Image: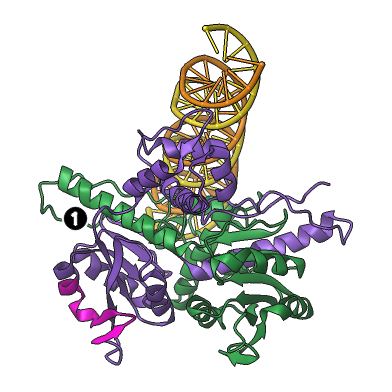
Chain colours: A green, B purple, C orange, D yellow
Amino acid sequence: MNRASYRTIGRLTHYWRALRDLEAEGQTYAYSHLLAAKAQVTAAQVRRDIMVLGYSGTPARGYEVRRLVECIEAYVFPSSEQRAAIAGMGNIGLALLKFFTGRRPNLHVTASFEADPEKFDRLIYGCRCYSIDSAGEVIRREGISVGILAVPDAEAQYVADVFVAAGIRGILNFARTPLEVPAGVYVENIDLAMSLDRVAFFARQSLKTERAVLPAGTPLDKASAGGTPSDEAPSANKESES
Amino acid sequence: MNRASYRTIGRLTHYWRALRDLEAEGQTYAYSHLLAAKAQVTAAQVRRDIMVLGYSGTPARGYEVRRLVECIEAYVFPSSEQRAAIAGMGNIGLALLKFFTGRRPNLHVTASFEADPEKFDRLIYGCRCYSIDSAGEVIRREGISVGILAVPDAEAQYVADVFVAAGIRGILNFARTPLEVPAGVYVENIDLAMSLDRVAFFARQSLKTERAVLPAGTPLDKASAGGTPSDEAPSANKESES
DNA sequence: TTCGCATTGTGATTTGTTTCACATGGAATG
DNA sequence: CATTCCATGTGAAACAAATCACAATGCGAA
């Protein structure tokens, strides 16, 4: 039972979602290749990922949906309430707060922080907004372990320092600044501008190669998926050869 | 001059940002290890990435900032106007529209699409909002090549199909549905819920191992960065051994 | 009860990426 | 002008992750 990698954790949440759908449809068993199709990975990948759970399916029948759901939940999701806070109530911060609210049983955004006095000391989407100056105190008091950074780039490092000092152990960072944090604190960066640049880049590439290699107007046939489950190498799809 | 990988493209935009900062400070030359520090990667990585540009620095002086900036721009950014559209003007869609507007010289969000008649036929942040039904026509007319999907999961595939049929070659997908697209169309997924789950997971891990291996109350010393430049394997940092 | 088959779990292999390590070479100094 | 220093560019090695391929296994049909 190996320790799960960054990417395995991500894929497990995809399987979980697919399994929930299957369960809703009344399916009680599922094969690796079914899950693979739903998550756009290979069947071998699914089996490898499931290995870390310590759960085994049965040959000829596959995985028991309910049990597998439970195993993934036990492994990936919090068993008791875990709390998160968002810093920065701009457009992105607000959207994230709304998006994350009530999404997972044991994961709650219970506080938000702002520098602008217009905004704090209010309730936003049912979540109390505090001054950034009281972040340390609030985080400690409420036992918050996850921080979401949606502040301007220039303030990201400062807020991260406050977060870490207050005991936060995982940060979801939307600022473009690479954060310096102590060893042991996990940081996941989401760089929206970079992602858009990248999509634009590969879209141009695609246009170029299409014009270059296809007889111009060749229909694109529906084939292997072009993308990446959220982050791994997405192989800007080769042209179909037909 | 190899073809750049998905990750290299991402890092090049980080170098670009760092270089712009250096330029603003009046620096005219930069060493690989300086860029490495600013982008939180190794110096060798920086040199490898820069190789794809076909630009060479000079030993003992490093890279000429201005020239390198130009090379990255020529390689990664569009040389003439490239257009993008956003589908879904909910919280996330609105925030993205605002965020992306005016961010890159040659990359513009020129249209948005909605299903809700309350919202379309209006100007939002200076961008015309159309009915989703006219998406195909608008995309073709305006020559839009990049699509951003911020619609509910259930509609993501449908909108992606419309996008692709209209000629879009790159999609930034915020829905959790893995999209099926023809070969040659690039998809980058950003799964916010998954990212939060993952941060929460590694934050818990970190709490556990800290309690397990440290004498309880050991100060965390500022060390190697804990994170990942937006997506690669982030190695939930080992505890410092001090 | 036995057989055949489709599926699982996993060692071995491949593929892709990062890091190492060193030969090469420009610049500054005496 | 020669020498020393440091940084670049890159082949080779190390590493990580995904895929392959196959033995082991349990189910259902005969």
Res. A48 visible in picture: yes
Whole-percent x, y for residue B57 in the image: 45, 33
In x, y percent, where is residue B36? Answer: 56, 43
Callout 1 amino acid = Leu
Q: Nearer the viewer, residue A172 or A223?
A: A172
Taking the spot 53% from the left edge, 77% from the top edge, the residue there is A93
Q: Which residues are magenta?
A: B121-138
Residue beneath disc 1: A220
Give B60 or B10, whichever is nearer the viewer: B60
Give the SS element for disc 1.
loop
The answer to which of A33 and A240 lies nearer the viewer is A240
State left or right for residue A241 relative to residue A90: left
- Taking the image as shown, residue B155 lies to the left or right of residue A56, namely left
**Residue B83 image point, x, y percent:** 26, 65
Q: Is residue A19 left or right of residue A110?
A: left
Residue at 77% from the left image edge and 79% from the top image edge: A137
Residue B122 on the magenta span: yes
Chain bearing tag 1 is A
Q: Quadrant of residue B199?
A: bottom right
B211 magenta-colored: no
How many marks overall?
Answer: 1
Rendered position, A50 above or below A84: above
Q: Residue at 43% across / 62% down in the picture?
A: A193
Neighbours of disc 1 within 10 Å: few (<14), some (14-19), many (20+): some
Q: Is residue A76 visible?
A: no
B198 over C4 or under it: above or below: below
In this rendering, would A13 be left or right of A105?
left
